[in-house]
Image: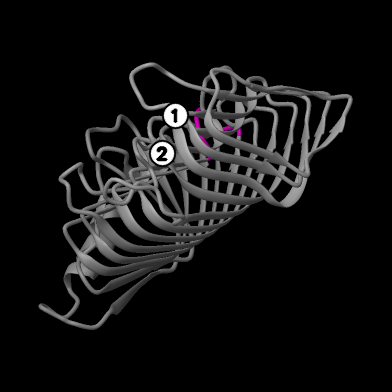
Amino acid sequence: MNTAVQAAIDSLTPNRTTKERVVVRGSGDIPAAGRITMRSFTTLDVCGTINATGATATDRGPIFARGVTDIEVQHVTVTGAPLYGIFMRDVANVKLGQITMRLSGGLGVRIDNGNTGDYTKNVKIDDVYVSGAGSHAVETFGVDGLTIGTVTARNVGESGLLLNKTINATIGTVDAVDAGNGTGYAAFRMANRNGRVGDAYPSNITVGLVKARGGARGIFCVSESGGATIGRVDIAGTGNNAILIENCYNMTIGTKGGTVTGGGEVRLAARAEFPNNKDITLRGFTLKNNTIRETPCADGFTLTGVTLTNATVDRC
């Protein structure tokens, strides 16, 4: 299958400047150490299932792209335990449509810039479902311009959606059940200066809904991230913090309300090696059977319109 699909992609018009499309009408196995390599201005539509078999290798995934532009994966289902189900690096103008991954290890979708300093730009993902990954369902690093409809994560080893050093992102829904059990990850996590534009944190990350059941944390913002607004929260029974905000800036949670029930504390915390939390707002949701705790004191913490049901607030 790997050889056939690659041959089809490589037979398209050389040096094209508009997309041409390869349709795979069937299912098959490919080596986890192999990869289908996308070329610029290519659309891939897999009507069946790609099953990754055997041992994997560095930078490998059934669908791979590096240093290319204007690429699209309309549909694909991936099974097995690849290192990455989809791995794209130093790309631009990417669209992923309906992506399903029922894995037994590895990471679902990883899109990054190779930590080169230049952003991967203009990434759109419609809907991704990932179960059974050993790591994250979806992870970005170094992306400028990200639009995601829905990330659905079930029983993944780490985060449902992890954004690192990503700016100008609009996310519809993160829906995670048992994401990161026994870890410090979260249904939705921001890290590594996510949302930082230059030396500031203007509002540039928007999430419509974070839904979490069980798992580790519901929402986790860490390591100088921020510039984010989360509309609605629906978090219950997390094994670690329901919400943890640690060294983050210009962060607002609950503009559209919702409920946080049980689990670990809603916590504002800080590590000494980073500047303290600044301009954090919790608003509009209902907190049940839990506590909001601020320690150390943030530089600007607003708590407004939060309804407490068998819940307490411990703040400065």
Which color scheme does this rendered protein use? Answer: one colour
Q: Amino acid at mark 2?
A: Ser
**Residue 37 appears in the figure:** yes
Instruction: From the top left corner, tell me how far across and down residue 218 is, in percent.
Output: 63, 33
Residue under the image location 67 percent in, 20 percent down? 239
Q: Extreme left residue here?
A: 15
Name the one closer to the observer, 26 or 192. 192
**Which contiguous range is marked in magenta?**
155-160
Category of crowding for the residue at label 1, using alpha-carbon neighbours closer than 10 angstroms: few (below 14), some (14–19), many (at least 20): many
Mark carried by residue 8: none
State the quadrant of the N terminus: bottom left
> Where is mark 2, residue-wise?
225
Instruction: From the top left corner, tell me how far across and down residue 140 is, in percent.
Output: 37, 46
Where residue 8 sits, quadrant-wise, is bottom left
Q: Secondary structure at mark 2?
A: strand
Instruction: From the top left corner, tell me how far across and down residue 206 is, in percent.
Output: 53, 56
Image side of residue 292 versus residue 103, left or right: right
> Where is mark 1, residue-wise?
247
Q: Extreme right residue here?
A: 310
Q: Amino acid at mark 1?
A: Asn
Name the one closer to the observer, 188 or 225. 225
Rendered position, 95 above or below 115: below
Residue under the image location 64 percent in, 30 percent down? 178
**Disc with the residue nearer the chain's start (1 vs 2):** 2
Rendered position, 51 above or below 224: below
Q: CA distance from mark 1 to mark 2?
A: 7 Å
> For residue 311: magenta?
no
Instruction: From the top left corner, tell me how far across and down residue 188 is, in percent.
Output: 54, 40
Residue under the image location 55 percent in, 32 percent down? 186
CB-based contact (under 8 Å), mark 1 and mark 2: yes
Q: Secondary structure at mark 1?
A: loop
